[in-house]
Image: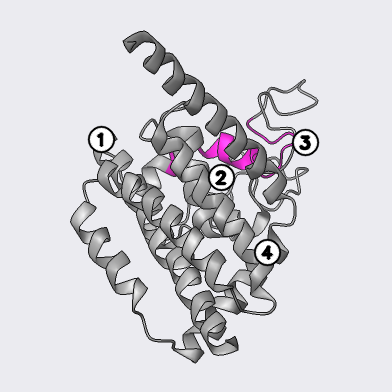
Amino acid sequence: MEQQERENFYRHSTLIVDDTNEVFQGLVDLHLTNESLNLIQFIENNQHDIYHLCYNNITCCSCPTKAKKPIGSPPSRILHPSQLDILFDINKKHPNHNAHNRAKHCCCPVSTKLKRDDLDLTLARCLLVNFSNVVPDHSKERYSLEKLIKFRNNTYGHATKGTVSNKEYCDNREEIEACIMILAKTCGREEDFRQKLKDAKVRTLDETICRQLQTSLLLSAQRETDIPAVIETAVEAAFEKFQGKHESTHAGNV
């Protein structure tokens, strides 16, 4: 039984860490194609807002001079400094940077080495929800995206032991796969992901990779200690809006 639950954890984690991350990145690609941008240009266009999703309580050099708090910043942190390390070159500053502002990422240019594959789930979600229209509010795509983040957060709870029960694995797998396929259809990669999910069901346990996944999840959980509550609220709000829209449409067709 323990061996089976270890295999369940391995397959469940690869669905979340590999397949979910890849479909999120596919949605980012879709947005970039739609807007005729590359990733660096996209980040540059939204750099100030992205910065304040991390530094939500302090102003930066680009904020209005008399502002005491960033305008429109979230009540709690969405991104972590380690994630901004991925996006920005912390060894450089723009010429107009105020040296009295000692925040690590203030006025740092976007890293010229940034690639799509560098985006983790939280970063990709942040860009899609805040700066893109490929997963519209009230839509099944938005709900699927938020639901997959919730599954990722729940996976953190299994990372210490590295096991998942048969029932939980089977129940979660069906829902995770359904959400992935909704997003795969949006970015035009249904057949690709259908095969990936088919392969995932029979993937043989690789203990080395499993330990790497376990370590990665534990590190992410440690870094994102305040993220689950934020995402939980977003998931519930997305579900309520999607359900309300669906019920209104159904009533109108009766």
| Element type at mark 1 | helix
Q: Specify the farthest residue to the front.
A: 254
Q: Quadrant of residue 140?
A: top left
How many C-alpha atoms fall within 10 Å of the one at disc 4: few (<14), some, or many (≥20)?
Answer: many
Q: Determine contact: label 4, label 1, CB under 8 Å.
A: no
Q: Would residue 76 be seen by someone viewing this image from the given angle?
A: yes
Residue at which label 2 appears:
94
Give, as a three-letter code, the residue at label 3.
Asn
Secondary structure type for disc 3: loop
The local secondary structure at tag 4 comes to helix
Between label 3 and label 1, give the one nearer the viewer: 1
The amino acid on which the numbered mark 1 sits, given as a three-letter code, is Asn
Sequence order check: which comes first, mark 4 or mark 1?
1
Is 54 included in the stretch rendered in magenta?
Answer: yes
- Residue 34 badge: 1
Considering depth in this image, is 47 or 183 the residue closer to the camera? 183
The type of residue carrying mark 2 is His
Q: Are marks 2 and 4 in contact (CB under 8 Å)?
A: no
Mark 2 vs mark 1, foreground winner is: 1
> Marks 3 and 1, how far apart in space?
33 Å
Could you tell which of marks 2 and 1 lies nearer the N-terminus? 1
Label 2 neighbour load within 10 Å: few <14, some 14-19, many 20+: few
Disc 4 residue type (three-letter): Ala
Closer to the camera: disc 2 or disc 4?
A: 4
Using the numbered discs, state the Cα–Cα distance from disc 4 to disc 1 in whole angstroms. Answer: 33 Å
Which residues, given as a range, are shown in magenta? 43-62
Q: Are marks 3 and 1 in contact (CB under 8 Å)?
A: no
**3D distance between C-alphas at marks 2 and 4:** 33 Å
Distance (Cα) linking label 3 and label 4: 23 Å
Q: Which mark is residue 57?
A: 3
Q: Is 221 rendered above or below residue 228?
A: below
Nearest to N terminus: mark 3 or mark 4: 3
